Image (spheres, helix red, strand yellow):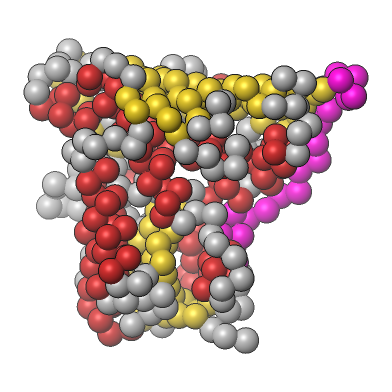
Amino acid sequence: MKKYSAVIIGGGNIAGSHAQGYAAIDEIDIVAVADPDRDKAAGFSKQFGIRSVYGDYRDMLDKERPDIVSICTWHPFHAEMTVAAASRKPQVILCEKPMATSIGEAEEMIIACDRNEVKLAVGFQRRFLSAWTKARELILGGDIGQPVRLSHVRNTGLLNATSHGLDCMRYLLGDPDVEWVFGQVERKTDRYERDIRCEDCVGGFLRFSDGVQGSFQTDLLPDDDQTWAVAQGRQGIVEFDDNSVRFFNEHTHGWKDIKIDPIDPFEAQARELVMWLDGEREHRNRAENGMWTMQMMMGVYESARRREKVHLPMQTRANPLDLMVESGELAIERPGRYDTRSFLLGGEAMSLDDTAA
C-alpha cells in the first residue's frame, strides 16, 4: 500500500475536520501542522498525534516536502499560500472554500499549479454528503424527468455557506457550464466575513448550458429556515437539504422520503484524493469546478455592479463587491465594521489587522 504524507496549514476548526478525514485513511500520514499561533499548533498536533509543529508554513513546506498540502486558513490567504505551496511541488493541494476572493486570485492559483504539475482541489465537501449525492442520482437518473429549475436558500454570506449551494447546483446537474448570472446585492452595514467584505443579503438567477435555470437567495430568511433546495423537473420534484431527501413523481403517489446513510464528507473527500493520486478517478472537487463556483459568485457581484445580465466566464478579475464599495456605489448607511467570524480569532483581536491576536 502506497502512503502519502500530508501537512496542514492552519490549526482551527476546519483544519481539524481535514485532519479527522486524513486520520481515517490508512494511505495518508499527517506529518506536520503550521500555524502562526504556536500554542494552537502545539495543541492541534497533540490532538491528532502529529509529530512536527511550525510557526511558518513555508518552513514546513521546505523541510517536510509533503505529497498533500491542506490549506485551512481564512479566505484572503488562499491564493498566496497555494502559489507558495505549488512552487514546492507537492502532488496535490487541497484548499478550503471559497477558492479565492477574486477571479484574478483563482487564476493565479491554477497557473501556479499547472506550471508545477500539481493537482489542485477546492474543499466543497458537501459534494460528498449522502443527501446531495442521492438527490443528484434522482435528477440525473430521470426520476423527475427533464430538470427545468433549481432553487437554493442559505444564510451566512455568498462566499461562505452559499458557495456550497452554488457549487452543488452544478454538481446536481452533472457539472454543466454556466451561461449567465443575474444578481442583486444589499450592503448597508460594514459587514465582513473572515476579513473580506461581505454583503448583507444577496439573490440571483442563473442559466446552465443544459437549459436549466437556477435561483438562490442568501440572508433573506430567518436562521431557522436557512438551508434547503428544490429541483423541479417535467415529471416531478426533489426537495432536499444537507440531511434529508424526498421526491415525488407519477409513480410515488405523493412524497417519498429517501433513507440517508450518514457519511463523513471529509473522510470521503480524503479517500477520493488518494484515488485521484493513484490515477483511479478524477476528484469531484478539482480546481475546474472551484473556478466555476468563483465565476458564479463574482458574476453575481458583477451583475449588481453593471446592472445587467453577465455572461460567463467573465473577464473582471478584481472582486466586484470591493469595486462597488470603494467607488461609493454601495454606500454604508449604518457605519461600524464588524466581522461575522470574529469569534474564531484569539486574544483581544476582532480582525486580522489587530496585533493582539
In this orientation, which residue lies closer to the viewer: 127 or 46? Answer: 127
- Vertical placement of residue 283 versus 161, above or below: below
Question: Taking 72 as reference, is 338 left or right?
Answer: left
Question: Taking 266 as reference, is 299 left or right?
Answer: left
Q: Is residue 341 one of those drawn in magenta? A: no
Residue 319: x %, y % from top left: 22, 36
Q: Residue at x 67, y 45 (%)?
A: 133
Find the residue positioned furthest to the top.
Answer: 333
Corner quadrant of residue 156? top left
In this orientation, which residue lies closer to the viewer: 339 or 314? Answer: 314
Q: Residue at x 59, y 54 (%)?
A: 265
Q: Is residue 131 visible?
A: no
Corner quadrant of residue 158? top left
Q: Which residues are magenta?
A: 250-271
Corner quadrant of residue 141? top right
Residue 268: x %, y % from top left: 61, 60
Q: Check the picture and name the quadrant holding the N terminus.
A: bottom right
Residue 333: x %, y % from top left: 17, 13
Q: Residue at x 56, y 46 (%)?
A: 126
- Vertical placement of residue 155 versus 91, above or below: above
In this orientation, which residue lies closer to the viewer: 354 or 311? Answer: 311
- Vertical placement of residue 193 versus 186, above or below: below
